[in-house]
Amino acid sequence: MRDLAGVFKALGDPNRLAIFELIRQRCGPGCVPTDDPATTVSRLAEEFELTLSTVSHHLKELRRADLIRCEKRGQQVFCSVNEQMLRTMENFAVGQVAGAEVQKEAS
């Protein structure tokens, strides 16, 4: 549950949510981070008209929540979605998390 709390906290910021969704759309299931140059930090900064440091901060928070993976290749950093965390979020959304686990974490 703590992992999911961190996920929802990270996605609570509108810019992070938009960045995450763009990465998810461009680098979906089975995507290798270096497949799409549109998932680089510099391209994301251009796309959202944000500074590199601002995008880097948002990506750091998404990585901390284990929502994305980043891979450095030369001067570029490529991002992809952590599919395992997506499955965890999906299981939570459809109610496949046991109520006992929720109560145990809350106490």
Image (spheres, rainbow, N blue to C red):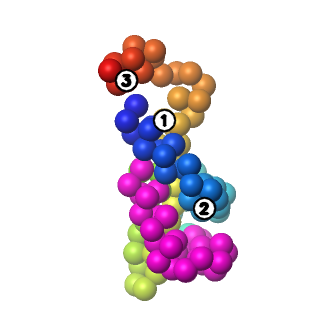
Q: Position of residue 71 (x, y in %)?
A: 41, 69
Residue type marked 1: Thr
- At x 43%, y 58%, the residue is 61
Of marks 3 and 1, the one in the foreground: 3
**Secondary structure state at the residue bearing disc 2:** helix
Q: Is residue 83 left or right of residue 18?
A: left
**72 versus 102 height, above or below:** below
Q: Which residue is mark 1?
A: 88
- At x 60%, y 76%, the residue is 50
Q: Which residues are magenta?
A: 36-65
First in sequence: mark 2 or mark 3?
A: 2
Image quarter where the N terminus lies is top left
Q: Quadrant of residue 99?
A: top left
- At x 51%, y 60%, the residue is 80
Of marks 2 and 1, the one in the foreground: 2
Q: Which residue is mark 3?
A: 106
Tag of residue 60: none
First in sequence: mark 2 or mark 1?
A: 2
Residue 98 falls within the magenta-colored stretch: no
Q: Which residue is mark 2?
A: 15
